[in-house]
Amino acid sequence: MQTLINGVHKFQQEAFGTHQELFTRLAKKQTPHTLFITCSDSRINPNLVTQTAPGEIFILRNAGNIIPSYSGHVGGEAATIEFAVAGLGVEHIVVCGHSDCGAMKALLAPDMVRNLPAMKLWLANAEVTRRIAADNYPERSGDDLLNVVTQENVLAQLESLRTHPTVASKIAAGTLHLHGWVYKLPTGEVFAFDPVEGQFRPLAEAAVVAVKARHFGNTDAAPDEKVSPLVTQSQPDRP
């Protein structure tokens, strides 16, 4: 705890004063442009990775960056998404998975959570991911399989996001865009799903494709269209 306390003191004495105008403005209102959904893993700092300041991104974190499909049972994820989209008017939602994800490891090896009943129930929300991996990648194993599952999970959560009424409505209106990312811990690289190529590519390359597609009028898929096909079997740009 002393490390945290020392950090707070340093923040108050150094950082807060330097950015007084920013914090004064944020005390009255927030206008984030992006909802950033990622894992609770302590090795990921969304603001550090994206180099964003306070107030720029609205962050939702949980084990495995999982978004349960919309249903009659409303949990924290659904409420946060609704507030970000309908309340704050974010224009983008990023679902960001990461390498060496413990939740994805447990999805592949359920015995890891046999004594963690809450975690076991939570991972049931990623059953689509598990089934896609089992049915479509039987030849994969080890880190290669974990890598594929991490990517497929990001795509599955993008699909799940579309079941949320506020998200579906804004996508139909063309005012909200979804993005799938994977962050590679050892290198700091970020890979983004390229819907044109149907695979994950280095973020800079995927961004170029997205800009070109939008320029020629090919924007996001229609609300009733599948977000993406399965990641291709041979994937040189896979993180």
Image: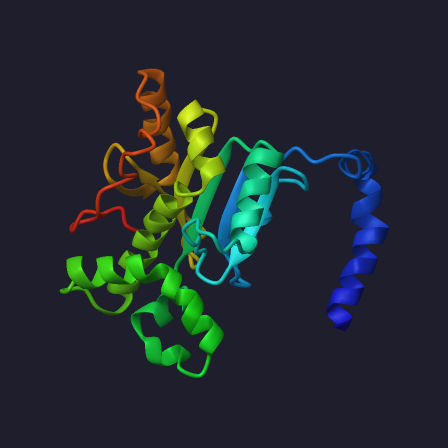
Q: Nearer the viewer, residue 40 or 84?
A: 84
Q: Where is residue 105 shown, x and y percent of the image?
A: 35, 69
Q: Residue at x 46, y 42 (%)?
A: 94
Say if 227 sits above or below 108 in the image: above
Query: On the rendered structure, is 197 left or right of 154?
Result: left
Q: How is the image coloured?
A: rainbow
**Residue 172 placed where, x, y %?**
40, 27
Instruction: In the displayed orientation, state which residue is furthest to the bottom.
Output: 115
The N terminus - image quarter: bottom right
Q: Looking at the image, which residue is at 51% across and 59% down?
A: 62
Residue 42 occupies which quadrant of the picture?
A: bottom right
Q: Using the rendered view, name the quadrant where residue 54 is placed.
A: top right
In the picture shown, does residue 93 fall above or below 140?
Answer: above
154 to 62, vertically: above or below: above
Of 9 and 89, the residue lying toward us: 89
Which residue is at the far front?
72
- Residue 27 appears left or right of 104: right
Q: Position of residue 176 (x, y in %)?
A: 46, 30
View extreme (left): residue: 139
Q: Is residue 50 visible?
A: no
Of 30 and 190, nearer the camera is 30
Q: Is residue 23 left or right of residue 61?
A: right
Across and down, in percent, residue 215 comes to 35, 17
* Residue 200 in view, yes or no: yes
| Rendered residue at 18%/64% (across/down) | 140
